Amino acid sequence: MAENISPLFVLSLVFFILISLTSSSPSLSLPPRLWPPRFLGQFSRKPASSNRLRLQQYRYDVRYFEQPLDHFSFSAEAPTFRQRYLISSDHWAGPERMAPIFLYCGNEGDIEWFAQNTGFVWEIAPKFGAMVLFPEHRYYGESLPFGSRDEANKNSTTLKYLTAEQALADFAVLVTNLKRNLSAEACPVVLFGGSYGGMLAAWMRLKYPHIAVGALASSAPILQFEDIVPPETFYDLVSNDFKRESISCFNTIKESWDAIISEGLKENGLSQLTKTFHLCRELKSTQDLIDWLYSAYSFLAMVDYPYPSNFLMPLPGHPIREVCEKIDGASDGTSILERIFKGVSIYYNYTGDADCFELDDDPHGMDGWNWQACTEMVMPMSCSRGGSMFPPSEFNLSFFEEDCRKSFGVTPRPRWITTQFGGHDIKTTLKIFGSNIIFSNGLLDPWSGGSVLQNISDSIVALIAEEGAHHTDLRPATPEDPDWLVEQRATEIRLIEGWLSAYYEAKRLIFDM
């Protein structure tokens, strides 16, 4: 029997947010979307198809470290939890040579999934004689306080220890303890991270400069907060990715929203939409279908890699091009909605394994990423009028706050991240207080609009790839890698070499004193 495929749209930053949508047509309107796709939080669960994928296998040991549940309390009976981490010393040159430690800042998901999809770190470790360390982010994977996922995510009392600040402290305590036990206190640490992990890598370099000599922050939208960047940036970039492939494809998608609403208003309209999109269960509202499509288009923009990949779903190279070819290439007489279904099937069913599709992932689930979105990871998003293929929308903080209070009993703090890690003028903050950070971005990635895209100083560097997608540089090397990607990785290696050389020179001078 063919497998049902889940929509996988509990994505992001946690990343996000409440959107109130209104159609461009005065006669039709879309209801408010209180919980749109959380694109970073997508990684809090492995893709449903991951058991079918052939992943690169890297050698590592799985270990556990007893972490304080609250690093910022001094209670005598403070509870702890077991943090999972992956470690490989296969190529480590050892403490005698002050060989480096490459630490990947775990994201909002299973750490083994990130380890398997971060080939760059593994591939350059032999060159540097580096140890490789992948600590898991608290509340994700197997690093669960209170004994189980259900207990950890039970309510605001148990979830209150899930913050970026606590996670960074976990990384700092773990690597400090590890270095002490290995007599490797002099070994420099280089941080790596992609997406939310890239944000953590950049923030850790700022907060713990004595622990790490530098950070490679790939696709890290550290500017996606408050109004530092326009809230429509993300969805405008998604739209641009489709427009650059085909203006007719872009227009078909833009027209499809009214077609969906119009069909849904008809007698038996939801049943017809269920059939058109091959859904496993009767559609209850057009909004469920709209969310499903938003997710597909957004993910496709994130993973528009130039070669076949299986990061989120098994996909061909240049998947947006493939989607638009399906939409544009449908035979005469094919309806708009049938064209849309053919297109999104590239994302949801490229392998052809699915007979039907499930739309029942619950974005209101008490999972870790939704909690982070409702507390400190508040990233406003909206859709612009005219230039977007999505219906116009505006972020409504009041509605979002109300929904978070209903779901978790907490009120979001949209200004906390800028208070904690740097305010609106974060670039000045980085220039004055920061050093040795690479912000790498692919301009096809819709998250690039919230990242650092210009050099800030000689040591805080922005590497931009016009044809790059979501942390393309961190993915395993392939024979299909374009020249620009090979060159970008070579530049990153040279910069890391520079950090380490400066560190060793400083150590030599200290020893000579």
Image (cartoon, grey):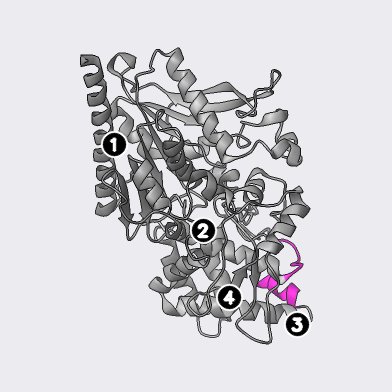
What amino acid is labelled 2 in the image? Answer: Phe
Magenta range is 269-285
Residue 507 occupies quadrant: top left
> How far, Cα to Cα, is label 4 from label 2?
20 Å
Asked which secondary structure carries label 1, the reply is: helix
**Residue 266, numbered circle:** 3
Label 1 crowd bin: few (<14), some (14–19), many (20+), radius 10 Å: many
Which residue is denoted by mark 4 in the rendering?
392
CB contact under 8 Å: marks 3 and 2: no
Q: Are marks 4 and 2 in contact (CB under 8 Å)?
A: no
- Residue 272 forms part of the magenta stretch: yes
Marks 3/4: CA distance?
23 Å
- Disc 3/disc 1 C-alpha distance (Å): 60 Å
Rendered position, 220 above or below 176:
below
Q: Which residue is mark 2?
A: 299
Amino acid type of the residue tagged 1 in the rendering: Ile
| Mark positioned earlier in the residue sequence (3 or 1) | 3
Q: Residue 200 location in percent, x, y?
A: 48, 41
Q: CA distance from mark 4 to mark 1?
A: 43 Å
- The disc label shown at residue 496, or none: 1
**Magenta stretch: includes residue 7:** no
Residue 98 bears which disc, if any?
none
| Disc 3/disc 2 C-alpha distance (Å) | 30 Å
Which of the marked residues, 3 or 2, is nearer the chain's N terminus? 3
| Front residue of this view, candidates 82 and 422 | 422
**Amino acid on which disc 3 is placed:** Lys
Quadrant of the image for the C terminus?
A: top left
**Secondary element type, mark 4:** loop
